[in-house]
Image (tube, grey):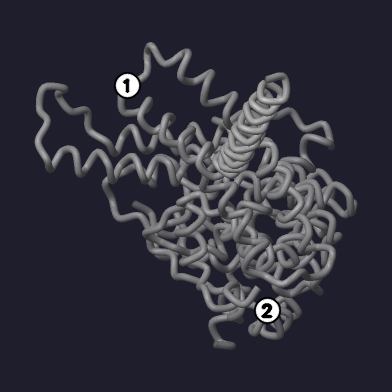
Amino acid sequence: MAESNTLTDAEIMLKIAGYDSKALEQLYDRYAPFLYTLIKKIVTDKETAEEILSDVFVIIWRQIDHFDFKTNNIYTWLVTLARNKAIDVLNRRGGKRLPDYSDEYEKEYIIPKLSEEVETLELEEVLSRKGKMEKALGSLTDAQRYVLELSYYGGLDQEEIANKLKIPTVTVKSKLQVAIGNLMQKLSEAK
Amino acid sequence: MDKKKSLELIKLEVLGCLNEKDMESLKIMKESKDEFPWKELADYQNLVALIPSALELKYPASELKDKTAMKLYSIRDEIKAKIDAKKALEIPSQPVEENSDLEEKIELEEKIEVEEKVFAEAEEGFHIIADEPLAPIQEESFKIVSNFKEKEESKNLINETHDKIETAVSKTAYEKDVIEKIVRDYIKSHIEGDIDLLNQSVKKNKILSFILFIITLIMIGALYFIKQ
């Protein structure tokens, strides 16, 4: 599959918008391992993770009209989409009361809504900066890293984290804000 | 607008852990005419998307590609409907009386486009097989589905198009033309060879019959002379 290496993410997405199934296959080849890694971290179960990954590509195919070609940030859109879907499955399986899963629900809560000023990220570039992210995460305190993980991979909101850790919601809020702020600062310094 | 407050909420929103009250506050901030820190929101959206880059890559089972392809195939009708809807929006309705050369030309181009769309999926699947050398098991997925898809579509094509023609009372003449063209193309590519063979054998049979007829005449003549 030589072509998949030559087309950019943006070119692939444009082809998918024209319902080119080969382009979707290329996107799968390129992103499946990365998205699977994220989904598996969230749901932990291999079979569920695979099911979700498969569903994510069906959503891309069905909802490509909702991808914003102005921002064209495929990486962030895909990662956010995969995370939203995985967290949704996790919450439903955990018995959380959520609206019925419908097309409207998917558009509202699963499809990412990125700010128009978002800068484009490419998967290759992101993977090449893996070490910097590890270092930035490593620079957080254990408590900061823990609440960040409970939120990002665990899909817990402030109150749920507060209940789990038996600490006030205000503390959770503040820890999350400081953690994410520090992470931003460390990554900016590492650039 | 309190930019500090907005930033605090943005940091929680990108992690997906805003409570309902804060979610509502942020929504109001975004909709207000004041300057909302969209750039900061964008930066934090990118930042959280970078978090999983620290994880060790894991790979899904190779068969998953097959399963995904099957799922995609199962929603083909929905996708076709979307393509048709898009086309309907793109093609403006034209009065029947007007029939200039230019309009005919445009109509012909549109017909070709629609036809291409109708077969796009099957054709793409075919290209996947045609363009690429046979690769490991995971590469089989789209091929299997594509083959299956093509065979099924070929088998059902004539039936489907006949059904379409029968129910075409509500359809436009333009759609009918496309359907008839698809049928003609199908007949050309799949049945014409058989017709040629049939024609050849009919020709041979005719010649043989003619020869037998002559032989019979000669024999009757010979018998007649013998009797004389």
At horizontal 38% and vertical 11% (from top left) the residue drawn is: B169
Label 1: which residue?
B172
Front-most of residues B8 and B168: B168
Query: Residue B100: in sight, yes or no?
Result: yes
Label 2: which residue?
A133
* Image quadrant in which the N terminus of chain A is located: bottom right
Q: The residue tagged with tag 2: helix, strand or loop?
A: helix
Relative to residue B205, is residue B171 drawn left or right? left
| A162 relative to A191, above or below | above
Please tell me how crowded label 2 is: few (under 14), some (14-19), or many (20+) other residues with Cα within 10 Å. Answer: many
At horizontal 29% and vertical 39% (from top left) the residue drawn is: B90
| B198 relative to B141, above or below | above
Position of residue A109 measured from the top left corner of the image (x, y, whole percent)? 58, 40
Please state the total of marks drawn on the protein image.
2
Question: What's the residue type where badge 1 is placed?
Answer: Thr
Chain at numbered mark 1 = B
Front-most of residues A146 and B226: B226
Question: What's the residue type where badge 2 is placed?
Answer: Met
At horizontal 45% and vertical 44% (from top left) the residue drawn is: B117
Please tell me how crowded label 1 is: few (under 14), some (14-19), or many (20+) other residues with Cα within 10 Å. Answer: few
Query: Residue B154: in sight, yes or no?
Result: no
Relative to residue A2, is residue A131 drawn left or right? right
Q: Quadrant of residue A46?
A: bottom right
Position of residue A13 measured from the top left corner of the image (x, y, whole percent)? 50, 60
Relative to residue B206, is residue B135 drawn left or right? right
Chain at numbered mark 2 = A
Position of residue B216 measured from the top left corner of the image (x, y, whole percent)? 67, 27
Front-most of residues A163 and B80: B80
